[in-house]
């Protein structure tokens, strides 16, 4: 596996991935309800290296709730796509679904990510791919060289993200799955559930089929 999945502390927390290298990147932070465990695990994994960057795949509380505490603990920069960043910057617990999870988020500084921007850890070059649908500002991160995709909640192993929350769009989800289906993907690291290290593209095509699309 190219990326390390942190321990799951709560059933409904998002997956949290550490992309290895001299400048490791953390992708998603869980709800933050047991964030001290994640911080302790990160300290161990980082083994003296700095955590400079946290990327959030989208606005939902189960992915962003822990961001402030982790960013503060490591003095890390938080980055996400513009269509989702403002509600996180504002600490909007409604628009991030915090209230649905029984939680609250605090305002936090967020840097906007651009489509096609490359984030490098020194070991992995991760390309930012806008993939709206599950939420307006959902992104995926693609390691072209290793054919590995971190997909957020756009697509799972055996499923697709919901598209019935505010800012979601079925039409955009279909377009995003089409866009991702053009990439060569072996390893697929979704926002929830298991990751796989082969045939990731099949899960994207299956996602399109689930929505009644022809491939
Ligand atoms: Zn989500």
Image: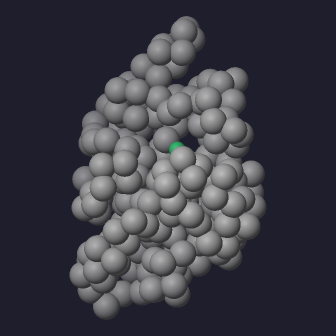
Q: Quadrant of residue 197?
A: top left
Which quarter of the figure has residue 84? bottom right
Which quadrant would residue 50 be assigned to in this image?
Answer: bottom left
Q: Residue at x 38, y 53 (%)?
A: 13
Residue 82, above or below 201: below
- Classify 108 as above or below 18: below
Residue plotted at (46% across, 77% down) = 70
On the image, the x and y values in percent for residue 41 come to: 26, 75
Q: Is residue 177 visible?
A: yes
x and y percentages locating residue 167 in the rendered image = 71, 40
Of residue 117 and residue 168, the one placed in the foreground of this image is 168
Residue 58: image location, x then y, percent? 59, 52
* Residue 147 is at least partly visible in this image: no
Which of the two residues, 159 or 95, is positioned nearer the viewer here?
Answer: 95
Numbered circles on residues, count = 0
- Indicate whether 184 appears above or below 141: above
Image check: 136 left or right of 73?
right
User: In the depicted view, which residue is nearer to us: 213 or 34?
Assistant: 34
> Residue pushed farthest bottom?
48
Q: How is the image coloured?
A: one colour
Q: Which residue is at a point 70% across and 24% down the rendered structure image?
A: 171
Q: Position of residue 163 (x, y in %)?
A: 60, 30
Residue at 62% from the left image edge and 29% from the top image edge: 164
Horizontal side, residue 198 vs residue 94: left or right: left
């Amino acid at each position: 596996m190219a990326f390390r999945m942190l321990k799951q502390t709560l059933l409904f927390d998002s997956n949290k991935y550490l992309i290895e290298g001299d400048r490791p990147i953390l992708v998603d932070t869980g709800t933050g309800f047991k964030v001290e465990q994640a911080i302790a695990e990160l300290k161990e994994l980082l083994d003296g290296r700095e955590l400079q960057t946290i990327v959030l795949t989208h606005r939902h509380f189960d992915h962003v709730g822990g961001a402030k505490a982790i960013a503060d603990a490591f003095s890390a920069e938080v980055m996400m796509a513009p269509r989702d960043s403002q509600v996180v910057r504002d600490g909007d617990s409604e628009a991030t679904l915090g209230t649905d999870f029984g939680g609250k988020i605090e305002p936090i500084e967020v840097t906007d990510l651009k489509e096609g921007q490359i984030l490098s850890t020194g070991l992995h070059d991760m390309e930012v791919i806008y993939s709206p649908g599950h939420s307006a500002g959902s992104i995926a991160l693609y390691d072209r060289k290793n054919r590995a995709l971190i997909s957020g909640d756009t697509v799972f192993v055996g499923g697709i993200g919901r598209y019935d929350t505010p800012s979601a769009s079925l039409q955009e989800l279909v377009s995003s799955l089409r866009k991702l289906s053009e990439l060569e993907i072996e390893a697929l690291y979704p926002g929830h559930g298991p990751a796989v290290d082969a045939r990731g593209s099949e899960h994207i095509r299956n996602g399109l089929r689930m929505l009644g699309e022809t491939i």
